Image (tube, helix red, strand yellow):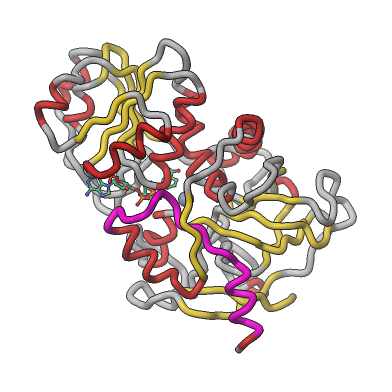
Amino acid sequence: MTQSPAYAAQAADKPLAFHAIPRRAPGPRDVAIDISHCGVCHSDLHTARSEWGGTLYPCVPGHEIVGTVTAVGKDVKKFKVGETVGVGCLVGSCGHCSACAEGLENYCENGFVGTYNGPATAAEGGHTFGGYSTHIVVDEGFVLNIRHKGNLAAVAPLLCAGITTYSPLKHWKAGPGKTVGIVGLGGLGHMGVKLAHALGARVALFTTSPGKEADAKRLGADDVIISKDAKQMAKQANRFDLIVNTVAAPHNLDVFLNLLKRDGTMCLVGAPATPHPSTQVFNLIFKRRALAGSLIGGIPETQEMLDFCAERGIVSDIETIAMRDINTAYERMLKSDVKYRFVIDMQTLKDEAKAA
Ligand code: NAP
Ligand code: ZN
C-alpha cells in the first residue's frame, strides 16, 4: 500500500478537501498510473452529495482519468511503463456473465466495480476511490489506450462524457440520413453534439440557455432550439429518429417525445436525483415511439470511441481548474456555467501535497 494525496467529501453536506487515501501495490494484472488530469462529471457531484443515496465516505470522485503508466504487474500484456492511458467509470466486473462476455461490462449481471464508490478490500479503504487523486492502480482489463497527440486534459472527458453519448448514438445507428437531437449543452451534451455530427447525422441541440446558440453551431449542431420556447418546439414535431437527453434535472419528457418520428427513440442518459414526471402514454403508443436509457459503455466500445476521436482530432471543450477549486466548480456546474467540462490539472494537487 502507498498513500495517495486526494480530495474527498467526508459527508454529503461537506465540501471536498485534501485527504490521503491508500492505493494497493500493483498485483500481477495491475497497471499503476500517475494521473495528469481528471474531468469533473455531474455524476461526481450527485455522488459526493449522496443525491442518489448510498454514497460511502470518504468519497473521492473522478472517473474521467488520463495519465502515464508508472508500473505494470508481471502478467500485464497490453501496457508498458511510460504509455499514456485512460480510466473511465469502471475498474472491474465479474468477467464471466453474458454481458461481460459481450464486452458490456457496464451491464455486468453481477455488478460492475465503479471507479469510485464501488466495492474494495478493507486495506484499500473498503470502497473504491476515484481520479481526484495523484495516482491509481487498475486491472489492465479496465485501462484504455490513449492515441491522441497533444493536449491530454481535453481527452479526459471522453472517458465518461464521450462514451456515454457515443454508445447510444451507435446503438440507435446515428449516421447519414438520420436526424438526432441532443438535449442539454453540458459535459455530456457537447460531446453528444460533436459525436453525432462526426457520425454524419443531422444534429439539433435543445438548450434552456439562449447564450449557448453560437457555441452549439460551432460544435457541430445544424439547428439550435430553445426548449422553453413552445413555438420553436412545435416546429420540430415528428422530425427526430433519436433524441439523447442529457439533462441532470427532472423535467417534462413529453415535450421531447412529441418531436420523435414514428418508431423514434428518446434515450435518457441524464440521471436526476428525483424522477421525471411520468410521460403521457399516448405520446408513445400513437407513433410506436420508445423511451429508453443507456449507461456509459463497455470497455471495447470505449476504446473504439477513443480511437474514433483520436483519428478525427475530437476532444472536449474544457476549462482547466486547480484541485482546490473543485467546490466552486461544482456550484458553477449547477448553474450550467461551464464551457463545457471542468478538468482538474492534477499537478495542482501534487504541488499542494508537497507544500503540506
Ligand atoms: P452538466 O455538465 O451539468 O450538463 C447538464 C446540462 O443539462 C446543463 O448544461 C443544461 O444544459 C441542462 N440542464 C441543467 N439543468 C436543467 C434543468 N433544470 N432543466 C433543463 N435543462 C437543464 O452535466 P453532465 O456531466 O453532462 O451530466 C448530465 C447528467 O448525466 C447527470 O445527471 C449525470 O449524472 C448523468 N450521467 C449519466 C451517465 C450515464 O451513463 N447514463 C454518465 C455520466 C453522467 P442547457 O444549459 O443547454 O440547457
Ligand atoms: Zn461521468
Give the magenta-colored segment's residue range.
335-354
Image quadrant containing the N terminus: bottom right
Residue 18 % position (x, y): 52, 80
Residue at point 51% right, 22% down? 199
State whether residue 97 is above or below residue 326.
Answer: above
Magenta span contains residue 346: yes
Q: Quarter of the image holding residue 147?
A: top right
State whether residue 171 is above or below residue 141.
Answer: above
Magenta span contains residue 32: no
Horizontal relation, residue 349 to residue 268: left or right = right
Q: Nearer the viewer, residue 109 or 355?
A: 355
Q: Nearer the viewer, residue 31 or 240?
A: 240
Q: Number of marks in the image?
A: 0
Residue at point 31% right, 32% down? 205
The answer to whether any part of residue 221 appears in the image is yes
Residue 252 % position (x, y): 17, 38
The answer to whether any part of residue 100 appears in the image is no
Residue 61 % position (x, y): 50, 63
Image quadrant containing the C terminus: bottom right
Q: Nearer the viewer, residue 218 or 165?
A: 218
Horizontal relation, residue 51 to residue 138: left or right = left
Residue 208 % position (x, y): 22, 42
Horizontal relation, residue 194 to residue 302: left or right = left
